[in-house]
Image (cartoon, rainbow, N blue to C red):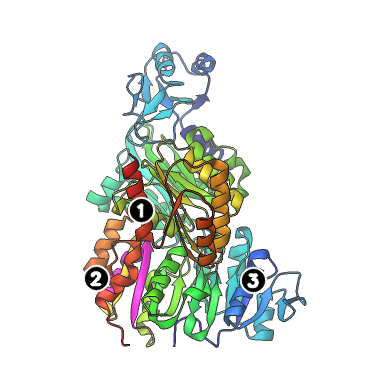
Amino acid sequence: MNIHEYQAKELFASYGIPVPKGYAINDRNGIESALAKFGDNEAIVVKSQIHAGGRGKGTFTTGYKGGVKVCKTKEDAKAAAEAMLGNILVTHQTGAAGRKVNTLYFTEASKIQKEYYLAIVMDRSSSKPVIIASTEGGVDIETVAEHTPEKLVKVFINPSLGIRPHQARQVAFALGFKGDTQKQCIKLLTSLYKFFWENDCSQVEINPLITTPEGNLVALDAKVNFDDNALYRHEKIVALRDFNEEDSKEIEASKFSLSYIALDGNIACMVNGAGLAMSTMDIIKQHGGEPANFLDVGGGATEAQVTAAFNIILSDKNVKGILVNIFGGIMKCDIIANGVIAAARNVKISVPLVVRLEGTNVKEGKELLSGSGLPLVTADSLDDAASKIVKLVKSAA
Amino acid sequence: MSILVNKNSRVIFQGITGKAGGFHASQCKAYGTNVVGGVTPGKGGEFFENTVPVFDTVAEAVNKEGANVSCIFVPPPFAADSILECIDAGIELVLCITEGIPVRDMAEVKNALIGSNTRLIGPNCPGVITPGALCKIGIMPGYIHRPGKIGIVSRSGTLTYEAVWQVTCEGLGQSTCVGIGGDPINGSAHLDIIKLFNEDPETEAIIMIGEIGGDNEEKAAAYIKDHVKKPVAAFIAGSTAPEGRRMGHAGAIVSGGKGTAEAKIAAFKAAGIAVARTPSHMAKALLDVYSPKK
């Protein structure tokens, strides 16, 4: 799960991690009172709050350029805020449709001496949290990793011991901090690790972490991701979820414990198992089609889930055909077939439907399908199924 | 022989009195697996299906029944602790079927496994089956398997069944099939299982099924290149998945250009592994490089 920058910074502040003073608003009527909290000669940064990167270089569909603006006067800040709030921002990460800016964040403009990079991620290769830090902040860290890997320092943390003083010192020395700044860095790292661990984060990133001319450290940006599997034990974090940032079909799917991800193609798929679902997408593409979604109905889908799954994939207006691919393991094919038949009758499918069943009770399942009178096509193998649906969709077009 | 499990495996099910645990314990028993007990705290002294004793703790099942393998069906908030209980009780092999365990819990478990006598497979995996020993421990459908000489290792459940079924339809069979699970942190990697298959005289050839995300497959490929003489075929799922989205399995995510299908396929080719272009050609890709002794 992702949260907004302003939410991440509020959480940081509660752990004693220094962030710039800031106020979030989600209503035009709140603009003036938020700006009144800043001094008259204070520069103010107006930041669009969406779950996508590249905000600064983004463009609004209104033609207004920049989802992040540094403003020298309150008048400028007000004008920028009015141009952003409620409008749709397109960045290189949002896709052409863009995202509506429902929240703005006003922060003080910090004086920057130097920019650094700091992150903690759960490293799957070592099965440990790793602190990643660099003197090259404010830029794309992947580029640093590729071209100047020597400028990245990585410190692996034993999950049972937590961060130890020498490890925090190692990072502070590597970043070249001295005196009080060094002490601040050690304190910040310890707090950041505590935040990361206690909240089941999968990633915490501060880019840039800055030093001010006075030698103080400030987290100028904050990006936090949480492990979805652990949300059950973090009520306060779950409350920060912003449904406006998620695809409505994906929200609906999560209500039925279906794993659904919307894609750009026109052939919907419904599969049991994540690996098989990915492979089904792959094979549709290899046959010249484009998958409309990833959908894993899981190992024990009920008729209600299969019906919900059909409703969700059909609510995507781009869908011109459906491929159902089930390898019945413990789940029996006849049960799946009944689910497909009942669901197909309930939701009235008007696009071509190809069903491939394999596994337990496959014979009974296929008989049910062919006896149902539904206009569906059965397939014997993955290849056969993909080739049939791609042909049907192309000939209907 | 086979790897990991055989006729001598003495298996317990943690969570045997739950719906899923009970159903699959029953299925495994029917397949021929030597199920010697179950563990559900507070239900010690009861019997599962009138014959299988239920214990309060894993240690008790080890002491009284000589259990050496455990299959875990405990809900996600408690599953990591169930694995730790196995480590403490000295269980040799743990198969954790549970899906949805927090990654932080698994980081702690992984740390606890170091220096222990326990090997963990999973979590979020279908389990392990050795058809020749009639030993099935997990949720895979038994009937699609056939005793044979091909070892199969995979991160995915149903995609493994797909490979198994293709092998069976070719008139061949499997030595052992291992689902290592789709989570970012799991007990055993492809590499660990490949090493076992390489040393197993009953395994003549190997099918390895991977997914986008992580560098597990690349590590296995590097080892195969230097150490494995047996024919190997491989498939990677997710070549069409968009970057930054978690494709069902928490581990299946391409981030920052890392873990792409292209990179993994390139590593396979460099290691002399036969790469199946589509998921329906996994057995065929193997047969391109492997001539079974009839």
Please determine if labels 1 and 2 lie on a single subunit.
no
Where does the image place residue B13, in percent across and percent down from the top left? 63, 74
Q: Amino acid at mark 1?
A: Lys
Where does the image place residue A197, in percent across and percent down from the top left? 53, 52
Q: Amino acid at mark 3?
A: Gln
Whether residue A154 appears in this view of the structure is no
B144, B179: nearer the viewer: B144
Pointer 2 local density, CA inside 10 Å: few below 14, some 14–19, many at least 20? some
Pointer 1 local density, CA inside 10 Å: few below 14, some 14–19, many at least 20? many
Numbered tag placed on residue A388 in the rendering? 1
Check contact, mark 3 vs mark 1: CB within 8 A.
no
Examine the rendered structure and indicate whether residue A273 appears above or below residue B145. above
Residue at the spot x=42%, y=22% of the render?
Answer: A87
Whether residue B97 appears in this view of the structure is yes
Determine the chain carrying the residue at label 3.
Answer: B
Q: Which residue is mark 3?
A: B14
Quarter of the image for residue B90 reads bottom right
Pointer 3 local density, CA inside 10 Å: few below 14, some 14–19, many at least 20? many
Q: Please, what secondary structure does the residue beneath circle 3 have?
A: strand
Determine the chain carrying the residue at label 2.
Answer: B
